[in-house]
Amino acid sequence: MQTDGNDGRVDSGVPTVTQGTALLRTEPDEAMLWITLTALLDAPGAALADVSRRSDALVPMLDELGISKNDRSTTGVSVYEEFDHTQKGRLSLGHRAISRVSVRLSDADLIGRLIARATEELAARIDGPRWQVAQTNPVRLQAAREAAADAQRKAQAYAAGVGAKLGRLIQLTEPNDAHMVARAAGGLRPMAVEPMPVEPGDHEVAASIQATFALEPS
């Protein structure tokens, strides 16, 4: 985002560029969870059939937990031969079939129940949860306002330090990665059927802005 002066003319003052930042904390709105089903068998068809059977069982499980079809997606299916490297060369271990499903959730308790059931009943591998702050969350706009105010305060301090005064705003630039959310991600192995405790905590939303002001004699 770039903003020039009101009349579009180049300011006669010497420009100064400052960067403003803001860091706020808020609860995440949702989390992504990845469920991976995998099998290693002698024949590729048998491996794929095993994964397909458990994938078929995953669908009613998600339905039972009240997870909307719009919030889940198959992100990949693959079948390949797996090898082990030995002193005698490559040794075939069989054929690996993999299916991966992503699920979007906002209820921490539901995440814990899904993790427990998928690992216990389907021998699934779990990756996540990876927490996200929605683009529509008001804290993002608040962070942008605070970053812009921070840039102006710094520019005023720089101007005072050299005996000048801060002139008009010449340009305002927002980097492409201005808004960043700290997200937690990890892997979990099969566990007991007891629900997995999941706590979202607070996450950071950062904003950054570059502001160019004119410097004028005081």
Image (cartoon, grey):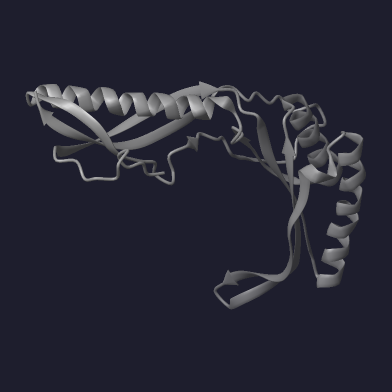
Q: Is residue 99 above or below residue 107?
A: below
Please name whichever residue, 134 or 93, is drawn nearer the observer in this view of the structure.
134
Image quadrant holding the C terminus, namely top left
At a point 78% along the width and 29% down the height, the residue shown is 110
- Quadrant hosting residue 129: top right
Q: Position of residue 28 (x, y in %)?
A: 61, 28
Q: Residue extending furthest front?
A: 7
Q: Does 21 sit left or right of 74 as displayed?
A: left
Across and down, in percent, residue 198 comes to 68, 26
From this viewpoint, is residue 43 visible? Answer: no
Q: Is residue 151 above or below residue 92?
A: above
Q: Left of 146 or right of it: where is 72? A: right
Q: Residue furthest bottom?
A: 89
The answer to whether residue 103 shows anywhere in this view is: yes
Asked where in the image residue 128 lies, by quadrant, the reply is top right
Question: Foreground: 6 or 213?
Answer: 6
The residue lying toward the viewer, choosing from 185 and 144, is 144
Q: Residue at x 58, y 39 (%)?
A: 185
Q: Position of residue 89 (x, y in %)?
A: 58, 78
Relative horizontal placement of residue 209, taking residue 120 as reference (left or right): left
The tally of labels here is: 0
Residue 4 pos. (x, y %): 32, 42
The answer to whether residue 48 is above or below residue 57 is below
Picture residue at 43% right of the left edge, 26% below the top: 145
Pick whichever, 195 or 142, lies toward us.
142
Q: Quadrant of the N terminus?
A: top left
Q: Residue at x 49, y 30 (%)?
A: 205
